[in-house]
Image: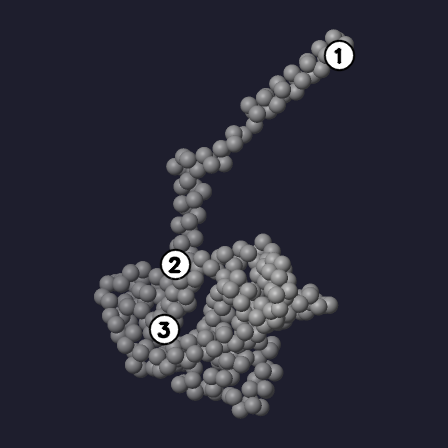
Amino acid sequence: MSTVTNRQADHAGTDIEAREGGRSHGPAPNEGMTYLSSIPRRVVTVYIPLLIFLFVLLFPFYWMAITTFKSNEELYNFHDFSPFWVVNATLANVEKLFFDTSYPVWLWNTMLVSTVATFLSLFCAVCAAYAIERLRFSGARVVGLAIFLAYLVPPSILFIPLATMVFSYGLFDTNWALILTYPTFLIPFCTWLLMGYFRSIPYELEECALIDGASRLQILVRIILPLSVPGLISAGIFAFTLSWNEFIYALTFISSSENKTVPVGVVTELVEGDVYHWGSLMAGALLGSLPVAILYSFFVEHYVSSMTGAVKE
């Protein structure tokens, strides 16, 4: 018995020494936290990639801004003026954009079409996503996949049959032509995004409401939608951005200058043959991108949280 006991003790001591040796030679628990403690490592792994990212992201806006306030002499005379900053700032390009073109009307048309198309798409997407994810009918997954695959169809293929329908219903050259065609590519992705968010809501909440006598509409309005506000904001931002920047449908279905949107109006009205009014073009592009940038800045936290929730699910 003593011999067996001694062997067990020796074996236990060997195991302890092996574990201690492994801990002594392994990485420290806080090594991941202290990796960026030195300045050279922070510069290489954090600051340099961040500066490159900011440069690539912000340089186009910087270029649009300086081009907006340059005179024609500065725009074309690189021998006497640097292309990377403004020497003699001028508001002539902004004045030409607002008073020689219908840019304020284009801005209003873009805002109206984007807002109405976004709300219409969100309404349809909420109904479709709730039906697919919460009603649990046969073939729901197939329907959800089919809706997402519809988003992958290029708009350049769809605008031909859509143009036939627009002409047939007498909607050509009106805002309704864009309001009713934009949801064809907004609804599929918004539905897919909301499906992932609705899936993360516990079914027990809905079952308790059904037991208490609530209808499906009451459950959707009073339980599902309040819990899905980040997802709705994310889908709304996505739909609004796509509607704001859309070009093919707006170019095809709108012909008169007073009904054009900003992406089409700036390109078609400020390019005369081979003459490009670069100052006014950049001013229109810069001012046209500000509403979307402001929208993102207000709702960026909800947007990120909703995308994270959808990915987790």
Identify whether 178 is placed above or below 216.
below
Mark closest to the chain's N terminus, 3 or 2:
2
Mark linked to residue 121: none
Q: Quadrant of the C terminus?
A: bottom right
Identify whether 291 is placed above or below 15.
below
Q: Mark 1 points at which residue?
A: 4
Front residue of 103/304: it is 304
Mark closest to the chain's N terminus, 1 or 2:
1
Q: Can residue 2 be seen in this view?
A: yes
Q: Quadrant of residue 165?
A: bottom right
Q: Residue at x 35, y 63 (%)?
A: 63
Q: Do the residues labelled 1 and 3 touch (CB within 8 Å)?
A: no
Secondary structure at badge 1 equals helix
Q: Do the residues labelled 1 and 2 touch (CB within 8 Å)?
A: no
Q: In which quarter of the image is residue 286?
A: bottom left
Three-letter code, disc 3: Gly
1 or 2: mark nearer the eye: 1
The reply, left or right, for residue 251 in relation to residue 19 is: left
The reply, left or right, for residue 49 in relation to residue 86 is: right
Q: Quadrant of the N terminus?
A: top right
Three-letter code, disc 1: Val
